[in-house]
Image: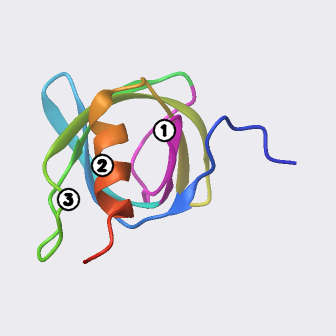
């Protein structure tokens, strides 16, 4: 059973993971909600309890703009990383942007 306040939506975004002002890896999201994100992160060395900064890159041909957010690594396994987001307003803006339909 899903226990999230807001549902996760399938959404592929290019993400750079930053720690101590250094990019530690590049990944892409597989789903996003206001509270969390799952990344396909390959072999990036991440551990539960680790804090990282996310730099969400703009997608060409879409309304997605640069976005920075902080996240806590919750789980790591088989190339996927589950993150709890820090409630950064840019995530709300990002999800609002990706919900818009052309008129």
The magenta stretch is 31-48
The residue beneath circle 2 is 94
The residue beneath circle 1 is 34
Looking at the image, can residue 53 be seen? no
| Residue occupying the point 78% across, 38% down | 3
Residue 75, x across and y down, in percent: 62, 39
The residue beneath circle 3 is 64
Secondary structure found at label 3: loop
| Residue occupying the point 34% across, 40% down | 91
Secondary structure found at label 2: helix
**Residue 96 located left or right of residue 75:** left
Q: Earlier in the sequence, mark 1 or mark 2?
A: 1
Asked where in the image residue 69 lies, by quadrant, the reply is top left
Q: Is residue 32 magenta?
A: yes
In the rendered image, the vertical position of residue 23 relative to residue 20, given as above or below:
below
**Residue 21 located left or right of residue 93:** left
- What main secondary structure does the magenta stretch of the protein show? loop
- What is the spatial separation of the Cα atoms under label 3 and label 1, in whole angstroms? 16 Å
């Amino acid at each position: 059973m899903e226990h999230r306040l807001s549902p996760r939506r399938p959404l592929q975004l290019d993400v750079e993971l930053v720690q101590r002002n250094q990019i530690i890896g590049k990944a892409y999201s597989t789903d996003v909600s206001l509270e969390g994100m799952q990344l396909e992160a390959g072999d990036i060395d991440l551990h539960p309890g680790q804090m990282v900064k996310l730099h969400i890159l703009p997608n060409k041909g879409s309304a997605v703009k640069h976005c920075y957010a902080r996240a806590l690594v919750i789980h790591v396994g088989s190339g996927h990383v589950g993150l709890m987001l820090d409630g950064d307003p840019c995530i709300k803006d990002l999800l609002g942007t990706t919900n818009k339909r052309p008129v």
